[in-house]
Image (cartoon, helix red, strand yellow):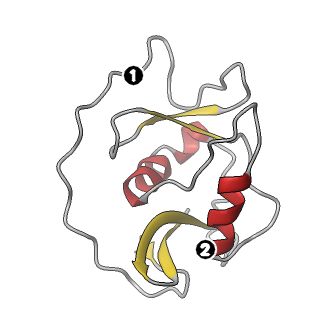
């Protein structure tokens, strides 16, 4: 379900036109651990490009702006270009959460919630309960 971190239901935004979809990389299924340690998370509905996730959650729960800063400053698996997924990308990852793995799907607040980069006010963004 789509709710903000206070538990209030959110109204879905109108769908944007989908970008040209890139084909899945040959022989790589969602959930495949890559040689650099990242996990292949599918094709971004926003960009049409492959998405990769860190193999594990951060160890701390964070407020949205804190999570944005943490992602921007993250260095892991030989990469420095981490970011929070936008709402459509986070939904795609939610739909493949079993294959990707590493998510807290307890649903407990705040541990089972994941932030997107999609703002809906000046100090809040869309989060999805896994």
Please rate how many residues cluster around mark 1, counting C-alpha atoms within 10 Å: few if below 14, some from 14 to 19, many from 20.
some
Relative vertical location of residue 38 with respect to residue 115 in this rendering, above or below: above
Q: Is residue 35 left or right of residue 48?
A: right
Q: Is residue 115 left or right of residue 42?
A: right
Relative vertical location of residue 19 with respect to residue 5 in this rendering, above or below: above
In the image, what residue occupies the spot 36% across and 80% down? Answer: 10
Q: Which element carries disc 1, helix, strand or loop?
A: loop
Where in the figure is residue 94, as x and y percent of width and height? 48, 53
Where in the figure is residue 39, as x and y percent of width and height? 63, 33
Q: Is residue 63 left or right of residue 14?
A: right
In the image, what residue occupies the spot 51% across and 85% down? Answer: 7
Where in the figure is residue 24, as x and y percent of width and height? 39, 22
Q: Is residue 109 left or right of residue 119?
A: right
User: What's the mark number on residue 110?
Assistant: none
Where in the figure is residue 95, as x and y percent of width and height? 44, 49
In the image, what residue occupies the spot 71% across and 18% down? Answer: 35
Alpha-carbon distance for marks 1 and 2?
30 Å
The quadrant in which the N terminus is found is bottom left
Q: Which element carries disc 2, helix, strand or loop?
A: helix
In the image, what residue occupies the spot 67% across and 32% down? Answer: 38
- Nearer-the-camera pick, 122 or 34: 122
Read off the residue under disc 1: 24
Read off the residue under disc 2: 64
Relative vertical location of residue 78 with respect to residue 69 in this rendering, above or below: above
């Amino acid at each position: 379900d789509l709710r903000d971190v206070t538990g209030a239901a959110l109204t879905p935004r109108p769908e944007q036109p989908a970008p040209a979809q890139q084909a899945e990389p040959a022989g790589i299924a969602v959930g495949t651990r890559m040689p650099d340690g990242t996990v292949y998370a599918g094709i971004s509905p926003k960009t049409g490009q492959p998405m990769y996730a860190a193999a594990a959650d951060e160890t701390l729960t964070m407020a949205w702006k804190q999570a944005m800063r943490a992602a921007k400053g993250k260095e892991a698996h030989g990469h420095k270009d981490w970011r929070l997924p936008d709402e459509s990308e986070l939904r795609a990852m939610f739909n493949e959460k079993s294959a990707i793995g590493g998510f807290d799907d307890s649903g407990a607040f705040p541990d089972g919630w994941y932030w997107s980069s999609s703002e809906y006010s000046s100090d809040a963004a869309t989060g999805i309960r896994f």
